[in-house]
Image: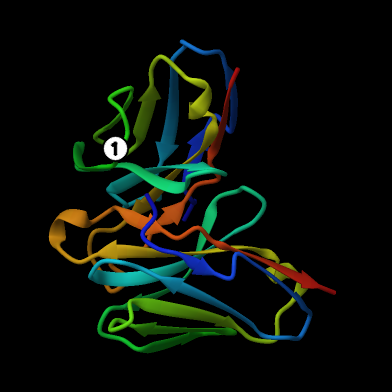
Amino acid sequence: KAGVTQTPRYLIKTRGQQVTLSCSPISGHRSVSWYQQTPGQGLQFLFEYFSETQRNKGNFPGRFSGRQFSNSRSEMNVSTLELGDSALYLCASSLRTGGEFGTQYFGPGTRLLVL
Amino acid sequence: SQQGEEDPQALSIQEGENATMNCSYKTSINNLQWYRQNSGRGLVHLILIRSNEREKHSGRLRVTLDTSKKSSSLLITASRAADTASYFCATLNAGGTSYGKLTFGQGTILTVHP
């Protein structure tokens, strides 16, 4: 099976702009989680989507939002970008059943630089 | 915020030696997982241990879990230069509402010298 794919891989934006990142999960995986990774804060959970519904949300401001489509592909959007939003954004897909319950399979990430 | 801490923050060893990394966490868990990350790329799942398990093996990896101490360790035996990476522990909290949310430690940077 193909792995998790994320587009774009690299992105440069300026403060105040908005950005949309895309994630395609492994075929058959219906849960998609998003994480932000920065040198200072490490890996932090943003949100999880399952069956087109947000199931969990991390401690991020409302500028961070997401959605999931009927084919399980997910997008996350960050509005009014701030310098501190510069980070590696990782998405991960998983099955919600099975022996390895909770195992997540990560994409390569989108590296966002805000100038 | 992070679930807990990993120790050491950095580890430098020679090829062939064993590497041990430790992880502590704070809440009741469903399972604990270890991931590897090479140079700021995506994370690769290594191994998962459930809360009712004490030890698990996969190839050169050995993971232990002590729920009474809320700690885990990852042992990589006979390390290779290709094992050079950052290693993260991640916990899935107990309770059905937390599915999909992994809480990560700060990671251990492992450098294996040829």
Q: Residue at x 35, y 68 (%)?
A: B25
Residue designated by label 1: A71
Q: Secondary structure at mark 1?
A: loop
Residue B65 percent location from the top left of the image: 37, 83
- Along the line of sight, which residue is nearer the eye, A6 or A87? A87
Q: Residue furthest top?
A: A16
Q: Residue at x 41, y 40 (%)?
A: A24
* For residue A7, side relative to residue A91 (left or right): right
Q: Residue furthest right?
A: B114
Residue A14 percent location from the top left of the image: 56, 13
The colour scheme of the drawn protein is rainbow
Q: Is residue B111 visible?
A: yes
Q: Is residue A102 visible?
A: no
Residue B94 percent location from the top left of the image: 19, 66
Q: Residue at x 28, y 49 (%)?
A: A31
- Above or below A49: residue A84: above
Q: Quadrant of the C terminus of chain B?
A: bottom right
Q: Residue at x 34, y 56 (%)?
A: B102
Looking at the image, how many numbered discs can be counted on the residues? 1
- To which quarter of the image does residue A81 belong? top left
Query: Label 1 amino acid?
Result: Asn
Residue B80 percent location from the top left of the image: 74, 76
* For residue A36, side relative to residue B32 (left or right): right
- Along the line of sight, which residue is nearer the eye, A74 or A79? A79
| Mark 1 residue crowding within 10 angstroms, few (<14) / some (14–19) / many (20+) | some
